[in-house]
Image (cartoon, coloured by chain):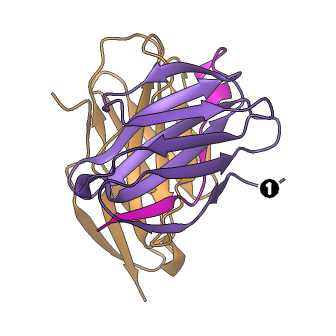
Chain colours: A purple, B orange
Amino acid sequence: KAGVTQTPRYLIKTRGQQVTLSCSPISGHRSVSWYQQTPGQGLQFLFEYFSETQRNKGNFPGRFSGRQFSNSRSEMNVSTLELGDSALYLCASSLAMSGGLAKNIQYFGAGTRLSVL
Amino acid sequence: AQKITQTQPGMFVQEKEAVTLDCTYDTSDPSYGLFWYKQPSSGEMIFLIYQGSYDQQNATEGRYSLNFQKARKSANLVISASQLGDSAMYFCAMREGQAGTALIFGKGTTLSVSS
């Protein structure tokens, strides 16, 4: 079974631009979560999507948005990029949002490393 | 207040030795899950082991075991017989049952295994 696939792996953008990152979950997984990882702040939750609906959101500005498609693939978008948005963006998928915690182990992709110049 | 605390920024161990990575957590939710992930330099977060708050026995997965002490709110990862490939960053994470699905991560511990 293929794992979580994130594209692209690396991106270089300049301040003010926008960027779209893509995530294909493990087959059969319906929940997709996004995390930002930086040396200073560590791993922080961005948002989660289930059945094309955002069900949970972290404490990030509105420049960060996402969506999920009917095939569970997800994209996240960052508009008006700032230098501080440079980070590793990780996507994780899990079977469902409801049910026991054990059923919702999140499996991560390799991430997209975004550099903002 | 930190919900997940990993006090060891770096740990060094020799091959074939066992190592314990510390993790303490803070929650008032009676239902929660504790997770350990491994992150090699490539960046991918690899799931290692899970412990539920109601689980009576400590979780084990191959060379990984989780020393769960609920009263002390600790969930230490034990790696037996370390291998060179175990060199990586290790993250402890928690998901609270009533707070949605977001994982809360600690700052991580860098493990270096030498021959």
Q: In this view, does A101 lie to the left or right of A42?
A: right
Q: Residue A17 at what x, y percent from top left?
A: 38, 55
Counting from the top left corner in percent of width and height, residue B106 is at: 30, 43
Is A52 situated above or below B9? above
Secondary structure of residue under mark 1 = loop
Query: For residue B30, which quarter of the picture?
Result: top left
Q: How many labels does the image show?
A: 1
Compared with B71, A95 (above or below) is: below
Q: Residue at x 42, y 62 (%)?
A: A114
Please, which chain is the residue tagged with disc 1 on?
A
The residue wearing badge 1 is A2
- The structure residue drawn at horizontal position 48% and vertical position 17%, both measured from the top left corner, is B100
Compared across the picture, whether A87 is left or right of A23 comes to left
Residue B47 visible in the picture: no
x%, y% of residue A117?
29, 68
Q: What stretch is highlighted in magenta?
A: A97-117
